[in-house]
Image (cartoon, helix red, strand yellow):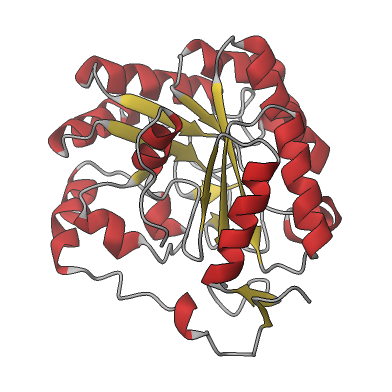
Amino acid sequence: MRAGFQEAAPGRLPSWARKGSPLALGAREVRVLLREERLVTVCEEARCPNLGDCFERKTATFMILGDRCTRRCAYCSISTAKPLPPDPGEPARLAEAAARLRLRYVVLTAVARDDLGDGGAGHFAATVAAVRAQLPEAEVEVLVPDFKGDLAALQVVLDAEPDVFNHNLETVPRLFPEVRPQGRYERSLSLLAAAKRLRANQTTKSGLMVGLGETDPEISGALRDLRAVGVDMVTLGQYLRPTREHAPVARFVTPQAFRRLEDEAKSLGFPTVFSGVFVRSSFHAAEVYRNHQGAEIPPRP
């Protein structure tokens, strides 16, 4: 085992994998606003360890198209159930919330909606348009599902001209059948490649979780695959089990080992890498994008 990696002990978190309470004092304003506008965040639904941090900084990752996913991934705490019809008023309410928070960088994600003909692509596009109408100077990142590889749906999202197109690979090909049974590794890579092909100069982003049972060479292989399809920005973070019903943590990665993963990704040619224990795809997304444009990357969490 590479130095800096530690086998997971049942029921125990190493000191570096513990984070403060999500009930940060400054987070109440964001929670109240979300309830008022009847909005959902992946921060809450996925039990993100960074929730308190982000809400206290008055930012959040909005999750459109409801809180019921049509897929069941072994690492994700978002509920799997028959979804409700898309809410046509949601884009406007979300844009209003973003304006009230004075956001200059808005991240939009969604549950997988395999029940919809376009996988929710039209709703993504409508939400991007609504945000741009309210906040014309804001940058927008979309973190999308794979749309079952539907390039017409992908084109709808790209036509909305997001600043960043993000689709997470999450794990290595060997583990896809186990932890992402309704996803396909090659399909995800193809989606990222197509985003580059269909829209000139589109900035693309993807992320990997470590600790699900992958090996070091498999991480390296996935990073090479992402770079081969032109991904510009990559995030690397520790998988943390949201509940006992989800996939167990196979190993913990030290902060020092995350620095080595960052160095490896940079050596493969990624222009921008954000790597750390608590790094998540949309954590400090604005700062990561601005780093890609030449500013400083945020401190590693």
Q: Is residue 154 visible?
A: yes
* Side of 161 relative to 190 (left or right): left
> Relative to residue 42, is residue 198 depicted above or below?
above
Give the x, y percent position of residue 191: 70, 27
Q: Residue at x 63, y 63 (%)?
A: 75
Give the x, y percent position of residue 112: 59, 41
> Relative to residue 191, is residue 161 depicted above or below?
above
When asked about the image quadrant of residue 120, the answer is top right
Quarter of the image with the N terminus in it: bottom right
**In front of the other: 295 or 156:** 295
Give the x, y percent position of residue 57: 21, 52
Q: Residue at x 74, y 60 (%)?
A: 179
**In front of the other: 17 or 290:** 290
Q: Is residue 71 visible?
A: no
* Side of 199 relative to 295 (left or right): right
Q: Residue at x 43, y 22 (%)?
A: 163
Q: Residue at x 76, y 31 (%)?
A: 228
Quarter of the image with the C terminus in it: bottom left
**In front of the other: 150 or 159:** 159
Furthest toward the right, the residue is 174
The total number of labels drawn is 0
* Side of 184 relative to 77 (left or right): right
Give the x, y percent position of residue 213: 76, 69
